[in-house]
Image: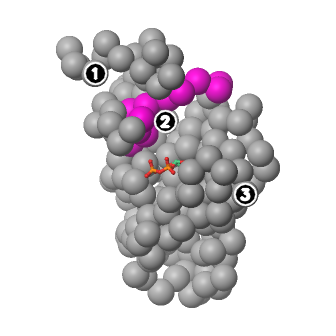
Amino acid sequence: MNEMNCDLAAVLLDEYRIQTRVREIGSQITSEYRDTVPVLIGIMKGGFIFLADLCRSITIPLEIDFLAISSYGAEASSSGVVKIRKDIDVDITGRHVIVVEDIVDSGLSLQYIKDYLGKHSPASLKVCVLLDKPAAHKLEVGFDFVGFEIGNEFVVGYGLDFNSQYRNLPYIGILKEEIYT
Ligand code: PRP
């Protein structure tokens, strides 16, 4: 029994559903990128667990890098201002890049990431997101692989945090309202 369970109103996606879907996306990427060596760029911090599972379900050679970003609080998030806390190390010019992100909420972070990485002239730039929250979109940013479409609940686990905690839950749960209000 996980000690963090008592903070959850419900489990939204259990380990089996997540792992099954991650393997499906991994197979899809394996087929699409055969004969290339793509660069997977995990968006920190939330994307680290998804990236770790996804890369192990892809069976072609690939490289991994990380981009860490953070938005400037509520006001900045609505203006789409994002700060880069850790830049990529790999030169992605002419490379096939796949961004690996845990969740698309407003879409502002992803828009920024796509614009930023696009300036490095990759051969291609695709985006893989585990969770999409359409009801929260402030802009419609295209992405290419998606795990699950979810409602507007406050979700934690499998990389996603509240107040820097819950990232280590091996499944995705809906946080009790009393915890975050
Ligand atoms: C979360 C998440 C996405 C972003 C999505 O990151 O990992 O990067 O928010 O929100 P948006 O679509 O409204 O821009 P967060 O800033 O919480 O940082 P973290 O990944 O370090 O938890």
Looking at the rendering, the stretch of residues picked out in magenta corresponds to 151-162
Mark 3: amino acid: Ser
Query: Which amino acid type corresponds to the residue marked 1 in the rendered image?
Result: Met
Mark 1 / mark 3, whichever is N-terminal:
1
Q: Mark 2 — residue?
A: 21
> Which residue occupies 22% across, 19% down?
3
Q: Nearer the viewer, mark 1 or mark 3?
A: 3
Q: Earlier in the sequence, mark 1 or mark 2?
A: 1
Q: Is residue 1 above or below residue 79?
A: above
Q: Is the residue indicated by label 2 positioned so its CB lies within 8 Å of ligand 1?
A: no
* Amino acid type of the residue that numbered disc 2 sits on in the rendered structure: Arg
From the viewer's perspective, tell me whether residue 125 is left or right of residue 156: right
Judged left or right of residue 117, residue 24 is left
- Which residue occupies 64% across, 42% down? 105
Instruction: Provide the secondary structure element on which disc 1 rests.
Output: loop
**x and y percent of residue 108 in the render?**
68, 55
The quarter in which the N terminus is drawn is top left
**Mark 3 surroundings: few (<14), some (14-19) or many (≥20) residues within 10 A:** few
Q: How many marks?
A: 3
* Camera-nearest residue between 103 and 64: 103
Q: From the viewer's side, name the closer residue of 88 and 146.
A: 88
Up/down of 35 relative to 51, above or below: below
**How many angstroms separate mark 3 from mark 2 (CA)?**
33 Å
Where disc 3 sits, the SS reads helix
Instruction: State the residue position of label 1.
Output: 4
The answer to whether residue 155 is seen in the rendering is yes
User: Mark 2: few, some, or many residues within 10 Å (few <14, many ≥20)?
Assistant: some
Q: Sequence-wise, which precedes: disc 3 or disc 2? A: 2
Looking at the rendered image, the disc whose residue lies closer to the viewer, 1 or 2, is 1
Image location (x, y in percent) of residue 49:
35, 47
Asked whether residue 57 is in view, the answer is: no
Q: Determine which of the numbered discs, if any, sits on residue 79 in the image.
A: 3
